[in-house]
Image (cartoon, rainbow, N blue to C red):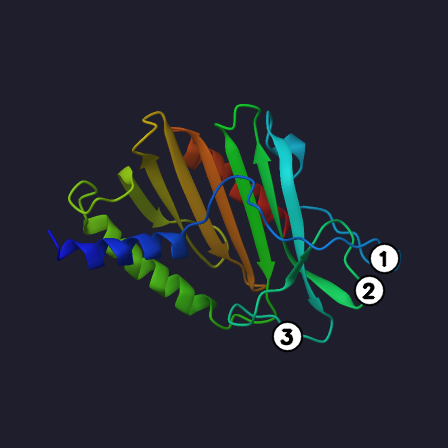
Amino acid sequence: METKKPLILFVLLACLLISGCVGGEDESVSETDSESGITPDVIIDSSDVPGLNLDNYYFYAVPESDIYTHNSSSGSTYKDTLPSGTRNVGEKSYWMDESGQHAVTVEIERYDSDEGLEAMFENGKEWMEILRKLDPQDANLPWAEYEDDTCNFGTNGYYQTKSSLDESDVSRTNILFMTSNNELVTINVRDETGKDRDEAMRIAKIVEERL
């Protein structure tokens, strides 16, 4: 039994690295009222996710002269208007229904090169291969069922679907893909079991068409 503890810890760490969280996270967001700044819009609107309300959102920004890559330090986060002298390098928005049972998160990061992206995808796929071979009960994993596969979005991508141990009628799907313009897209959907994957695929298609 003791020999399983390191494996469990590594698996849980991998899950955090290759899948995101759904719901309104408590992020530190800078506010600015600069009239000379830029006001961007999130890529998804309410008509794309019927029945959901925008729970939270923010934008990533870096100084205009900075080179932004996956391996570089993360940008600052702002609401609405970005300060003068910065540029928009991404966004994250959270959508949720009144019950909190159905939730969607959409994140886009716009990098200046593909540095680190291919390695990240290869590492993610290696971990998925490990997870695929594990028995959830035997390894004490925090889900009842697990599924993953590649997806036809962007130039490289995959999805993961996990059913909850505590809520048998709820599951979550995470889609991650990159584009030829070095954009990294992460979509997370929490929905009724059997609906989350199709909903995540539908939203991913909308996002890809608008990039």
Q: Position of residue 66 (x, y in %)?
A: 67, 75
Q: Looking at this view, is 129 or 32 the one in front?
A: 32
Can residue 128 be seen here? The reply is: yes
Seen from this angle, which residue lies furthest right?
Answer: 35
Q: Amino acid at mark 3?
A: Ile
Give the residue at x 48% y 54%. 177
Q: Which mark is residue 63?
A: none
Give the residue at x 21% y 44%. 140
Side of 158 where 135 appears, left or right: left
Q: Tell which circle, 2 or 3, labels the residue nearer the N-terminal end.
A: 3
Contact (CB < 8 A) between labels 3 and 1?
no
Q: Looking at this view, is 146 or 47 the one in front?
A: 146
Q: Which residue is mark 3?
A: 67
Q: CA distance from mark 1 to mark 2?
A: 7 Å
Side of 149 where 71 appears, left or right: right
Within 10 angstroms of label 1, few (less than 14), some, or many (20 or more) residues? few
Contact (CB < 8 A) between labels 2 and 3?
no
Q: Which residue is mark 2?
A: 84
Q: Which mark is residue 34?
A: 1
Q: Amino acid at mark 1?
A: Ser
Give the residue at x 38% y 29%. 170
Side of 9 where 73 appears, left or right: right
Contact (CB < 8 A) between labels 1 and 2?
yes
Secondary structure at numbered mark 2: loop
Which of label 3 and label 1 is nearer to you? Answer: 1
Within 10 angstroms of label 2, few (less than 14), some, or many (20 or more) residues? some
Side of 149 where 179 appears, left or right: right
Give the residue at x 68% y 46%. 42
Q: Looking at the rendering, which quadrant does residue 120 occupy?
A: bottom left
